[in-house]
């Protein structure tokens, strides 16, 4: 059985076929597979040092398929993990990030940050992000590479098996087309004090948000504040430790801080986490004790740490479920792009809707106090409310998604006569769908 396809689609075991990997060796590099999909890893044909040269190592022509068996010129799981865990970053970190990633530079910046006027800080940030349009990979404004690769892989197995459709467990509960998730990172005292008003604003449009709160140094977190968030049926989670930019500085310090973060997770009785400034190092997540993380962008052109996981669906990092950020942050939109409209968000939502992906947002109460930004945010809420009602989109809290995706990962799909049945805890909310192959293209049908 091919575990990668099963984990992604939850297809029946006897529909998975088998997979062989051609012999390959040598260094990792970029190559292409399928309809121009950029991969990173080892392949039988070799790889390029730069994304721009990956066309020289297109592997599609070297795929072999017969008797329900597909032979790939690379390890599918290795490539998918390299993308999800952003291991390709080592080959393509932009010039300014190399400078900003320097520990002395970062330490100096965070030391003087509180003394710098907001206008100066934003000028420095715009200079840092000046090259964002020239970053070749992942693809802006939403990257579907991991999802494309799974579709290509499934198509190959269907062709090798001579079948035109494969049943699988639909991505979202009750046949929802997509899932939308609103989260709010609270960065200052002002943001904390504006939380109640933001909860009320979201509620007008039928949205419940998750609030990520910094547990140390920035501001106090009284029990009454936590209780107020939860009493309004919103979610409370931990946001970094003290948001000083040093969480992943080096392993020993990270372990010390991670243990303190785990202590706050237990203290507040929460299950989720997001690192400050979306810093991340997935290979170190084994120290964390929370259930889900929200620190990895789909495409990170406008984040301090570039890269991206290249998928629009949740995925597991060990025992932790990652809920990727699939839209631009409000700060990036307003203060980096100087865009006070929802056009970029609408563009991203349209792309996500077409691929049934997770529509996840980060906005900050700190930046929504100002009336101009708040009006734009209200426009987004109104647009989301209409989408949810019109297109059968599941509006969920991160914890709801975490519980669903874990339940789905344990469900099984079996034939019962001419019907397909889903079994497992939570299966009453699950729906059977079919991947249908027509004219060499794959589409989904929900039954």
Image (spheres, rainbow, N blue to C red):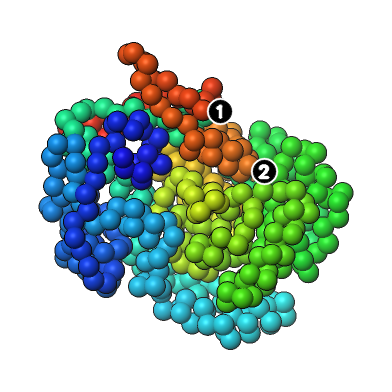
Relative horizontal placement of residue 83, taking residue 383 as reference (left or right): left
Mark count: 2
Q: Can residue 190 be seen in the rendering of this structure?
A: yes
Looking at the image, do the residues carrying marks 1 and 2 touch, with CB atoms under 8 Å apart? Answer: no
Q: Quadrant of residue 159?
A: top left
Numbered circle sitting on residue 284: none
Picture coordinates of residue 366, whole percent (x, y): 71, 58
Query: What kind of element bears circle 2?
Result: loop
Q: Is residue 242 above or below residue 84?
A: below
Quarter of the figure with the N terminus: top left
Could you say which is closer to the camera, residue 441 or residue 408? 408
Picture coordinates of residue 142, whole percent (x, y): 41, 51
The residue positioned 87% from the left and 49% from the top of the image is: 224
- Which residue lies under the disc numbered 2? 209
Q: Label 1 vs label 2: CA separation?
A: 23 Å
The residue positioned 75% from the left and 58% from the top of the image is: 264
For this orientation, the residue located farthest to the top is 417
Relative horizontal placement of residue 148, taking residue 211 as reference (left or right): left
Q: Quadrant of residue 260?
A: bottom right
Quarter of the figure with the C terminus: top left
Picture coordinates of residue 301, whole percent (x, y): 45, 63
Query: What kind of element bears circle 1?
Result: loop
The residue positioned 59% from the left and 65% from the top of the image is: 277
- Which residue lies under the disc numbered 1? 426
Q: Is residue 191 above or below residue 106?
A: above
Picture coordinates of residue 372, whole percent (x, y): 65, 53
Q: Residues within 10 Å of mark 2 (few under 14, many from 20)?
A: many
């Amino acid at each position: 059985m091919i575990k990668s396809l099963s984990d992604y689609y939850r297809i029946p075991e006897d529909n998975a076929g088998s997979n062989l990997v051609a012999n390959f060796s040598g260094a990792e590099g970029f190559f292409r597979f399928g309809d121009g999909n950029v991969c990173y890893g080892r392949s039988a044909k070799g790889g390029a040092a730069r994304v721009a040269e990956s066309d020289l190592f297109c592997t599609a022509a070297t795929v072999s398929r017969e008797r329900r068996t597909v032979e790939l010129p690379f390890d599918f799981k290795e490539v998918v993990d390299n993308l999800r865990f952003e291991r390709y970053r080592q080959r393509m970190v932009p010039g300014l990030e190399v400078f900003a990633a320097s520990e002395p530079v970062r330490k100096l910046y965070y030391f003087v940050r509180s003394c710098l006027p907001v206008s100066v800080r934003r000028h420095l940030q715009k200079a840092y992000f000046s090259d964002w349009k020239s970053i070749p990979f992942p693809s802006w404004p939403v990257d579907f590479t991991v999802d494309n690769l799974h579709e290509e892989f499934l198509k190959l197995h269907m062709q090798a098996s001579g079948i035109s459709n494969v049943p699988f467990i639909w991505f979202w509960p009750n046949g929802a087309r997509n899932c939308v998730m609103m989260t709010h990172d609270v960065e200052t005292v002002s943001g904390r004090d504006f939380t109640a008003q933001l909860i009320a604003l979201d509620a007008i449009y039928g949205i419940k948000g998750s609030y990520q709160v910094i547990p140390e140094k920035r501001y106090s977190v009284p029990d009454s504040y936590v209780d107020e968030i939860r009493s309004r049926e919103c979610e409370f989670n931990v946001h970094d430790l003290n948001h000083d930019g040093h969480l992943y500085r080096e392993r020993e310090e990270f372990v010390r801080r991670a243990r303190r973060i785990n202590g706050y997770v237990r203290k507040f009785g929460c299950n989720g986490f997001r690192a400050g400034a979306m810093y991340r190092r997935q290979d170190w997540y084994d120290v964390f004790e929370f259930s889900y993380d929200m620190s990895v962008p789909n495409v990170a052109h406008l984040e301090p740490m570039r890269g991206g996981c290249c998928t629009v669906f949740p995925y597991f990092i060990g025992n932790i479920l990652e809920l990727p950020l699939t839209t631009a942050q409000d700060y990036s939109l307003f203060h980096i792009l100087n865009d006070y409209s929802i056009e970029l968000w609408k563009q991203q939502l349209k792309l996500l809707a077409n691929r049934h992906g997770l529509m996840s947002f980060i906005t900050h109460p700190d930046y929504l106090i100002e009336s101009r930004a708040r009006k734009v945010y209200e426009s987004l809420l109104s647009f989301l409310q209409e989408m949810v009602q019109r297109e059968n989109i599941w509006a969920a809290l991160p914890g709801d998604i975490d519980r669903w995706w874990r339940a789905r990962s344990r469900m099984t799909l079996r034939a019962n006569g001419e019907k397909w049945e889903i079994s497992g805890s939570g299966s009453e909310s699950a729906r059977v769908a079919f991947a249908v192959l027509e004219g060499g293209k794959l589409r989904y049908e929900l039954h």
